[in-house]
Image (spheres, rainbow, N blue to C red):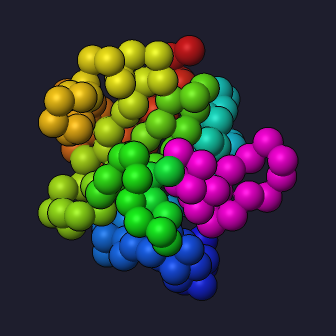
Amino acid sequence: MRATEIQLIETELGITLPDYYKHFLLNYPFEKFIDLPNGGSNIPDEYLLSFAKRKRDNEYGIIDINLLIKGYSKEGNQGIKNKLCIGIYDADYYFIDIENANNQSVYWIQHEHSYYEYYDTDTNVWNWEKMKVANSIDEFIENLIEKHNRE
């Protein structure tokens, strides 16, 4: 991803991305998700959204998906606050925290169960710790590659 795309994400969503995530977007070899070494299976590129805006009808970019789930909008935060969707697979969403730059965890919201299990309707608060799947994006990627190499 280019720096201009990162600026577009920040402008369109009205947020500031954490430095570690900007570094990741600028430097991560996203082609690892297409061609894994040693004949490993492919990881769907939706797991990590690697572009700012939609490229084709069936693909979403970071801006598109975050506006779609109403995580962020210029009119004000609605829905999931202080998190950015960085990936989606099979209607499940992967998020990072954009409020606390020291928190580099990746979280998973499963579309069928998470709302009922991890959202307190009385306080309007998500229990993010119970949805944590990795302590960092690097750990998240390692887990994805390992998982898909086993399948």
Q: How many marks?
A: 0
Q: Tell me: residue 35, above or below residue 67.
A: above
Which residues fall within the magenta stretch?
47-69
Q: Does any portion of residue 38 appear in the rendered image?
A: no
Q: Tell me: residue 127, above or below residue 70.
A: above
Indicate the quadrant containing the C terminus: top left, top right, bottom left or bottom right.
Answer: top right
> In this view of the protein, which residue sits in the foreground, 91 or 68?
68
Q: Is residue 87 left or right of residue 51?
A: left
Q: Is residue 27 left or right of residue 104?
A: right
Q: Tell me which residue sits at (32%, 53%) in the image.
A: 81
**Magenta highlight: main SS:** loop
Magenta includes 65? yes
Q: Where is residue 42, by image quadrant?
A: top right
Q: Tell me: residue 121, above or below residue 104.
A: above
Q: Does any portion of residue 57 appear in the rendered image?
A: yes
Q: Residue 50 location, x and y as percent?
A: 60, 58
